[in-house]
């Protein structure tokens, strides 16, 4: 049943996932993972009170559970901002976050927008890349500025956008005033066929870790070759082909702080 619940979450079938997880806790009322999965599913359906109850139950069973703690804090922030229920938010499917070498990457936002705009966002919300002068800005569905893409990614993506490439993006992480965005190349202009949106070089000894059905995100140093010269970049994030960053914690696993937790 746990495997079924995970599979339903990966497909974005949240109502069905709730039913399965509720069945699990009826049989095993001490299943912390099932309560965390319930919290995630309720968040996706906008049922924040039920989500809070599920995470509180998980914390009662395991007072040190990092997933439940983080998501209860996030729910509290949403409630205090009074914007979470009032804004139109478009979500992407879990499959959006599957990595494709050279075409997908995770970028950090700098010079963040207003606290209210940030508080109104959640993981997997669709956002939009907009070129503003020499900067690449990320906006929400309402056109509110969320922040600026870090320059070592933003400068390259800006040139590619101006050259005809197209991209889609979604929130991948919100944590302690840090916002990360997953970016996917959806169209490459023929004249830019030799240019990768996210030039990467994965360390030879890098071994992606897969635990049960969970797909982990990878954080590696990036190298970028620009105009024939190879220059070392600041620390970036990439995903091996076929791997997903979509909220490892959604499935109820406790993961280190440097891995993506279920934001709900």
Image (spheres, rainbow, N blue to C red):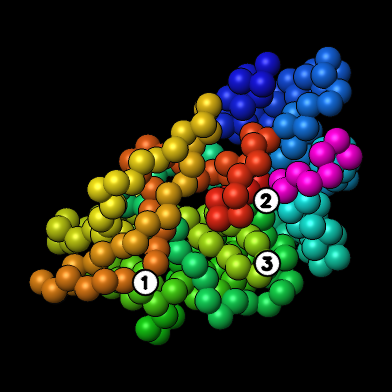
Residue 174 vs 144, above or below: the answer is above
Magenta region includes residue 248: no
Q: Residue furthest bottom?
A: 133
- Name the residue tied to disc 1: 234
Q: Which range of residues does the magenta coloring cover?
A: 60-68
Query: Residue drawn 58% across and 65% down?
Result: 179
- Nearest to N terminus: mark 2 or mark 3: 3
Distance of label 3 from label 1 (alpha carbons) = 21 Å
Assess disc 1: are there few (<14), some (14-19) or many (≥20) residues with their C-alpha within 10 Å of its C-alpha: few
The residue mark sitting in front, 2 or 3, is: 3
How far from the left and from the top, in percent, is residue 135?
Answer: 42, 80
Where residue 140 sits, quadrant-wise, is: bottom right
Distance of label 1 from label 2 (alpha carbons) = 26 Å
How far from the left and from the top, in percent, is residue 246?
Answer: 54, 43
How far from the left and from the top, in percent, is residue 1?
Answer: 68, 16
Where residue 92 sits, quadrant-wise, is: top right
Label disc, if present, on residue 176 of the rendered structure = 3
Assess disc 2: are there few (<14), some (14-19) or many (≥20) residues with their C-alpha within 10 Å of its C-alpha: many
Q: Nearer the viewer, residue 216 or 164?
A: 216
Q: Secondary structure at mark 2?
A: loop
Q: Secondary structure at mark 1?
A: strand
- Name the residue tied to disc 2: 263
Horizontal relation, residue 111 to residue 46: left or right = left
């Amino acid at each position: 049943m746990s495997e079924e619940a995970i599979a339903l979450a990966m497909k974005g079938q949240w109502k069905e996932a709730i039913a399965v997880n509720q069945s699990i806790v009826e049989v095993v009322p001490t299943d912390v993972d099932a309560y965390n999965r319930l919290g995630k599913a309720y968040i996706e359906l906008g049922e924040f009170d039920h989500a809070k109850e599920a995470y509180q139950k998980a914390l009662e069973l395991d007072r040190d559970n990092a997933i439940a703690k983080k998501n209860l804090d996030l729910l509290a922030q949403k409630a205090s901002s009074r914007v979470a229920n009032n804004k139109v938010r478009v979500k992407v499917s879990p499959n959006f976050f599957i990595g494709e070498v050279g075409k997908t990457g995770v970028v950090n936002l700098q010079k963040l927008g207003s606290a209210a705009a940030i508080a109104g966002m959640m993981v997997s919300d669709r956002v939009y890349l907009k070129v503003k002068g020499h900067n690449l800005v990320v906006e929400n569905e309402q056109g509110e500025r969320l922040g600026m893409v870090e320059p070592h990614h933003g400068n390259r993506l800006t040139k590619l956008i101006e050259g005809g490439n197209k991209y889609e993006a979604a929130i991948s992480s919100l944590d302690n005033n840090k916002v990360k965005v997953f970016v996917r190349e959806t169209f490459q202009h023929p004249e830019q066929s030799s240019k990768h949106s996210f030039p990467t070089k994965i360390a030879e000894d890098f071994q992606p870790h897969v635990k049960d059905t969970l797909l982990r995100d990878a954080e590696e140093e990036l190298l970028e070759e620009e105009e024939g010269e190879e220059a070392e970049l600041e620390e970036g994030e990439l995903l091996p082909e076929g791997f997903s960053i979509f909220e490892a914690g959604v499935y109820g696993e406790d993961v280190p702080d440097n891995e993506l937790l279920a934001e709900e």
